[in-house]
Amino acid sequence: MKVTSALFVSAVSAATLPATQQTQGLPLAQFGQVHSISIEDAIAKVDLIGTNFTNLPISSKPKFSAAEEKVSTASFAAADTGDCANPNIRFEWDNYSASDKQAFVDAIQCLINKPASGKFSPSRNRYEDFVRLHQTYAPNIHSKSTTQQTHKFLLWHRYYVWAFEQVLRDECGFNRAFTWWDEKKWAGRFSQSTLFTPQYFGSLPGATNGAATCINNGRFAGMQLSLGPGMTTNNPHCLQRAVNEGVTAQTGQSSWDTCMQRTSYPDFHSCVEFTFHAQGHNGVGGIMADAIASPGDPSFFMHHLYVDYAFRKWQIDDVRRRTTISGCADNNNCAPLTLDTMVYMGQICGAKCPDLRVRDILNTLQGHLCYRYDY
């Protein structure tokens, strides 16, 4: 078993590429892959070899009372003091009505059609503001390798997807409950899912002659992007995918169970980042296989809603997982991650997206957030 040494594999450099509109997919090698480990290696905890996460300090809120320690964490009842009273509920895609599904993809298309804010240059539209934000922060909010991890990944993306929701609501009038996608039930057959259809997110084709395939159906048919692969900018290319169902098969119940059995935050985080998170990206392929500019594919947000769902489910198994944190705040020197470590979002949703401390987003029912999932 080999310890991994690189997260972004063969990603294209930041050199300027020809600025011509693409109707054909780019070679798969330009996207690289999000580095992953197999389910077998996750079970064997290969991703933890050479780490010292168990020796890192634990940052915690005030201790619980004896009564709070005994509260069942199997339900969404207020296991924590101070939970928000009326949380927004995120409904799984198959529990979402056809009207809600259409409204959701229409709101995303609205962002694509809106001009860029000008704060995330050289983004070319409001949707690409989110791509550029992720592209800019990617080196700091993903682990470099299994031995150079940052444990801000889950926290940053939790805030990022929440910010995306706020902009859909405030700037495109989206007024439905939010959604998420239970990815594991489609493991090995993403292309057959109710998400990747000609009505909604478009089909999920395989590669074409070693290149990704442009998406010409669904709400985002013919979508053009200018950011990525990698750190590249001003590079027009189409929304493109290249499914590998052998890889999507790695996102199923086995990887879920393996990660859920880990008890410390850094160990759980490592498992998620390198297993079903990475395999979900690589399985969809094309733009999604490029960890840096992957939000260019709108399915990115559905994938990361699933990742956040997994994080929330892990947290509700033990009340302390919503009040304590440990791990590495960076992927270079492993400065301790604490409740007061800052999480930056570039104010992409204005005053709603200030720079926040970990404690403000650790619990989805407290602090800056107020939402839960429907199951």
Image (cartoon, rainbow, N blue to C red):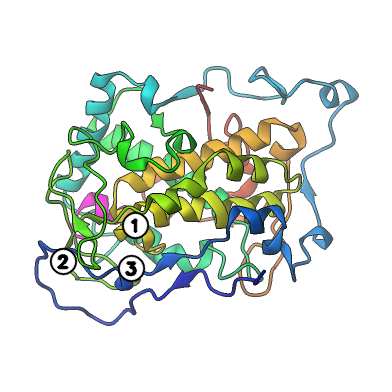
Q: Are marks 2 and 1 in contact (CB under 8 Å)?
A: no
Q: What residue is shown with label 2?
A: 236
Badge number at residue 31: 3
Q: Secondary structure at mark 2?
A: loop
Quarter of the figure with the N terminus: bottom right
Could you tell me residue 174's position as x and y percent? 27, 29
Q: What residue is shown with label 1?
A: 285
- Compute the Cα span from label 1 to label 3: 8 Å
- Compute the Cα span from label 2 to label 1: 18 Å
Could you tell me residue 183's position as x and y percent? 45, 38
Q: Nearer the viewer, residue 220 or 189?
A: 189
Could you tell me residue 86's position as x and y percent? 52, 17
Q: Earlier in the sequence, mark 2 or mark 1?
A: 2
Magenta range is 123-130
Q: Amino acid at mark 1?
A: Gly
Quarter of the figure with the C terminus: top right
Q: Amino acid at mark 2?
A: Pro
Q: Amino acid at mark 3?
A: Phe
Q: Nearer the viewer, mark 3 or mark 2?
A: 3
- Taking the magenta stretch, the answer to whether it contains residue 329 is no
Could you tell me residue 189's position as x and y percent? 38, 40
Label 3 neighbourhood size at 10 Å, few (<14), some (14-19), many (20+)? many
Label 1 neighbourhood size at 10 Å, few (<14), some (14-19), many (20+)? many
Q: Is residue 41 above or below residue 157?
A: below
Using residue 79 as the reference point, say whether residue 291 is left or right of it. Answer: left
Q: Earlier in the sequence, mark 3 or mark 2?
A: 3
